């Protein structure tokens, strides 16, 4: 049976992405795959995703090496299928060849075998076009020790090559012998300063110091790490933000004792636990309701300010791929408990590298909890094209004046970075002061809910 070879190209992964970088191939040439089986893992500017192939059959070719950028619409793999109708309907990719018999795409092609893998598992391998597969390269022979010389050759060895008993080395102290042995020194080459040439500890240390002095300083190794995938996207976005947005930052210290007490009270009740970040997210949505001009962005051509009706709250999260900013959609409509659930879900997805492009785009305001790194303050770069970001430092016990008396309180530093084109310092200061008041007296928040 003559197979039909179909070409599968990199599909549009959404969010205006034009390409992706190959992270890991999940199939090999000659392997039988099923319909919708993932064939490659790629990294876009937003996330790492597995790309399933709409064809079932035999992989005849792969395009792109690990680390290589592939444009949307460029070939990924070609698959030999048993029927032109074996693919998912509506995938839109072209087929090469015709006239194959109608066999199920998920089944191995008739006449093509399956062999055992070296690890004992079964991996489908086939040969395409009837050619016999090339024999596997033989395993290299194990290295053998040199054969001993023949007895006659040993007998004819010159007398100078025979083992001679070493001369007595004038060393008494076992400590001196150990010191020399640890540093690879030959005691026979050291002149002793003790009685009758006895080698002392100072003699060994002198030789060591002389060896260190002439040793040339080795240059530290340098490495150039290419900017790829998410790291490159972050670099480009931060550079653009720094170049285009005239950002300013203001900050204030706040007594978070009341916030921590409120959180403890909520967590004593039945239901899911409430995190500090969830409380801060709820405070932010209330603050943006009072200062809606901060939930905005400047048009790309600078012609106007776009004020967003919904709050899509981004929050900074650290993952193995680097810093990512998952987005909580319509955060202004969620309760504190619901915000906490979304924060937990998106954080777990970030750590597992499973965030989708849609979950990493479209934010209108960012909450940055850099206190988790044990630092007090920061002046972050805005998440372009957003106009504002609230930063929260660590909450730590510090001296604080309460009613004229010195007390130990749980104190945090709040910083607010904003696009000065969107508002002036009065608006920014008003928002930051509102947040600080809610942190110090969470009951104030009830007035604005």
Image: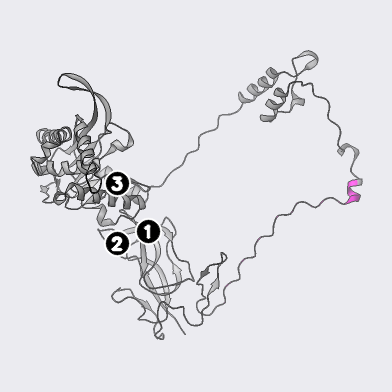
From what the image shows, is residue 380 above or below residue 358?
A: above
Residue furthest top as drawn: 195
Q: Which residue is mark 3?
A: 236
Question: Which SS does the magenta portion mostly show?
Answer: loop
Q: Which residue is mark 2?
A: 13
**The residue stretch that appears in magenta:** 132-154
Of badges 2 and 3, nearer the viewer stands 2
**Image spot of residue 267 (x, y percent):** 24, 42
- Seen at 44% across and 81% down, the residue is 3
- Seen at 75% across and 51% down, the residue is 145
- Seen at 68% across and 17% down, the residue is 202
Q: Which residue is mark 1?
A: 42
For this rendering, which residue is in front, 307 or 245? 307
**Image spot of residue 245 (x, y percent):** 19, 41
Q: CA distance from mark 2 to mark 3?
A: 20 Å
In the drawing, does residue 267 fall left or right of residue 285? right
From what the image shows, is residue 181 above or below residue 341?
A: above
First-in-chain label (2 vs 1): 2
**Image spot of residue 346 (x, y percent):** 28, 51
């Amino acid at each position: 049976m003559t197979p039909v070879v179909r070409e599968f190209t990199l599909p549009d992964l959404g969010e205006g992405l034009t390409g992706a970088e190959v992270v890991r191939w999940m199939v090999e040439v000659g392997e039988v795959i099923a319909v919708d089986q993932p064939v490659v893992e790629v990294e876009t500017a937003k996330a790492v995703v597995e790309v399933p192939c709409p064809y079932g059959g035999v992989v005849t070719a792969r395009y792109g090496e690990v680390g290589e950028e592939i444009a949307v619409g460029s070939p990924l793999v070609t698959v030999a299928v048993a029927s032109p109708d074996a693919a998912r309907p509506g995938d839109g990719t072209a087929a090469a060849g015709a006239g194959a018999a109608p066999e199920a795409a998920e089944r191995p092609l008739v006449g093509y075998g399956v062999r055992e893998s070296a690890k004992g598992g079964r991996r489908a391998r086939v040969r395409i076009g009837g050619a016999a597969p090339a024999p596997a390269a033989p395993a290299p022979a194990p290295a053998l020790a040199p054969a001993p010389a023949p007895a006659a050759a040993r007998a004819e060895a010159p007398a100078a090559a025979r083992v001679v008993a070493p001369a007595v080395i004038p060393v008494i102290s076992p400590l001196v012998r150990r010191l020399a042995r640890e540093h690879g020194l030959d005691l026979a080459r050291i002149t002793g300063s003790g009685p009758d040439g006895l080698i002392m500890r100072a003699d060994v240390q002198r030789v060591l110091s002389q060896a260190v002095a002439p040793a040339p300083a080795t240059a530290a190794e340098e490495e150039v790490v290419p900017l790829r995938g998410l790291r490159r996207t972050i670099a480009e976005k931060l550079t653009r933000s720094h170049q285009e947005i005239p950002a300013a930052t203001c900050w204030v210290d706040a007594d978070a004792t009341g916030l921590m007490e409120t959180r403890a009270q909520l967590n004593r009740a039945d239901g899911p636990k409430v995190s500090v970040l969830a409380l801060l997210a709820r405070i932010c949505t209330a603050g943006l309701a009072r200062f809606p001009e901060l939930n905005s962005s400047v048009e790309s051509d600078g012609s106007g300010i776009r004020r967003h009706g919904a709050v899509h709250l981004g929050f900074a999260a650290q993952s193995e791929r680097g810093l990512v900013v998952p987005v909580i959609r319509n955060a202004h409509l969620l309760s504190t408990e619901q915000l906490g659930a979304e924060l937990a879900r998106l954080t777990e997805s970030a750590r597992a590298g499973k965030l989708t492009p849609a979950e990493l785009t479209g934010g209108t305001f960012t909450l940055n909890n850099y206190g988790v790194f044990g630092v007090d303050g920061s002046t972050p770069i805005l998440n372009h094209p957003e106009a504002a970001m609230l930063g929260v430092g660590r909450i730590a016990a510090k001296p604080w004046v309460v009613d004229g008396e010195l007390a130990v309180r749980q104190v945090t530093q709040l910083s607010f970075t904003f696009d000065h084109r969107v508002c002036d310092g009065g608006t920014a200061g008003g928002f930051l002061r509102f947040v600080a008041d809610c942190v110090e007296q969470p009951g104030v928040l009830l007035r604005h809910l």
